[in-house]
Amino acid sequence: MTAHATRHAAQDHATQDHDRTGKTVDTETERTHPSAPPADGERMRRWRMVLGADSAESTGCTLTGQDAAMDGALNALYGGGGGKKPGGRGGGGRSAGLGASAPSVARWLGDIRTYFPSSVVQVMQRDAIDRLGLSALLLEPEMLEAVEADVHLVGTLLSLNKAMPETTKETARAVVRKVVDDLEKRLESRTRATLTGALDRSARISRPRHRDIDWDRTIRANLKNYLTIPGTDGGPDTGTVVPERLIGYGRASQSVKKDVILCIDQSGSMAASVVYASVFGAVLASMRTLDTRLVVFDTAVVDLTDQLDDPVDVLFGTQLGGGTDINRALAYCQSKIIRPADTVVVLISDLYEGGIRDEMLKRVAAMKASGVQFVTLLALSDEGAPAYDHEHAAALGALGAPAFACTPDLFPDIMAAAIEKRPLPIPDKETGS
């Protein structure tokens, strides 16, 4: 999101029903007559808020009160020289900037949380970290206590994990814990329900009770027993299928039915996917009918399965950044497959391979030939289609393992389809092969 776009989103929030000085704005006219333009003064105020301080002369608008305070918070980030490092000044003698100290940034974070909704605050936080190089300040506890916790902030904290002093780690873990707990509440119940149903349906039995009969599979299995019955009194012939063999759904048991291996690329661009995959890994590991393994990799491979009971431990066991060797990671995963026909391997990677490409493709082909259900996700996040290696994605698609981006809400359906060996519900063909 550009600086003007963020200002525009903030301005939309600021002009709902009340202006920032507390005066009532006549929005009823705009609701009942959407085509009616706002008064000239209000229109100029909005343009001034969107365009920033540099537009003060051209708009002829001077901000006061809370409007001025909100504009100051935006100027500190997006004002002239917004790409400079902390402590720098914008051009023309302007003093825009957040400063280099954690207390000043913490105060700014408190201001934007006062003026703007959470969605805008999160965008501004990310921009402050990216544009002004404020990552180092996240190593200070007072800064962490002031931020709006979200998935992107967790990714930044994980990238700083190795440089984080012990005095900050406790606060950082608390921030990560809050985000993880929120994600678990959002995702766990639906994931459990979806996969439990899929596991039941994947266990076929030959002597089902009437309510457990899978009529679609039963009919298809007995089409050879189709009988034609001559019509009576000149009526048309009819037909019927004699169900010599019934196929039914199994019922959940305490035994392990499927093995799941999550193989996660921990390069810096995959930060959000690592967070979501760790949460899902913990949810899957808590289901007794699944044997779940979680593997993260860059140029080395780390098995974090023993830490799956706590996704926060998993996240702090990752090391974001570095190169990528997908082939080595898949070789490790392949070595852990015991029951190929009952195994689902999920590779989460943007497919920028630093290892041996041909070997990687051979391993995927060998796993699929052995009966493994192989799923390739270019991303597991809400961020949309990522940058990825199109050539490798096409090669995997040719092997019957199309690569595509997946949102957290869709992931349970993807896993259910893989467990049942159904076609995957690919959301967007343009990110596939």
Image (cartoon, rainbow, N blue to C red):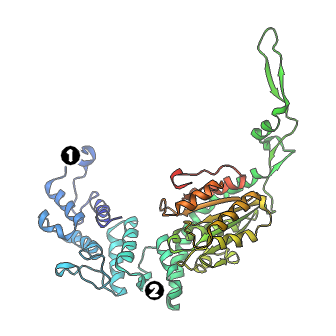
Tell me if 248 is positioned left or right of 15 in this view.
Answer: right
Residue in view at x 23 percent, y 75 percent: 80
Residue furthest bottom as drawn: 166
Tell me if 229 is positioned left or right of 279 in this view.
Answer: right
Element on which disc 2 rests: helix
How many angstroms separate mark 1 from mark 2 (CA)? Answer: 50 Å
User: Residue 50, how many percent across, how many down?
Assistant: 24, 63
Q: Quadrant of residue 55?
A: bottom left
Front residue of 209/285: it is 285
Tell me if 84 is positioned left or right of 431 in this view.
Answer: left
Kindly identify which numbered label has been placed on residue 36: 1
User: Residue 212, how many percent across, how many down?
Assistant: 79, 44
Nearest to N terminus: mark 1 or mark 2: 1
Front residue of 99/224: it is 224
Q: Tell me if mark 2 has few (under 14), some (14-19) or many (20+) residues whose alpha carbon lies within 10 angstroms of its own.
A: many
* Amino acid at circle 1: Ala
Front residue of 151/389: it is 389
User: Residue 332, how many percent across, how many down?
Assistant: 71, 73
**Which quadrant is the C terminus positioned in?**
bottom right
Instruction: Please tell me whether mark 1 or mark 2 is closer to you in this view.
Output: 2
Q: Quadrant of residue 225?
A: top right
Residue in view at x 60 percent, y 58 percent: 395
* Amino acid at circle 2: Leu
Vertical comparison of 255 with 318: above or below: above
Residue beneath label 2, please? 139
Q: Quadrant of residue 98?
A: bottom left
| Total numbered labels placed on residues in the image | 2
User: Residue 99, how many percent across, how many down?
Assistant: 30, 84
Q: Is residue 46 visible?
A: yes
Kindly identify which numbered label has been placed on residue 161: none
Element on which disc 1 rests: loop
Q: Tell me if mark 1 has few (under 14), some (14-19) or many (20+) residues whose alpha carbon lies within 10 angstroms of its own.
A: few
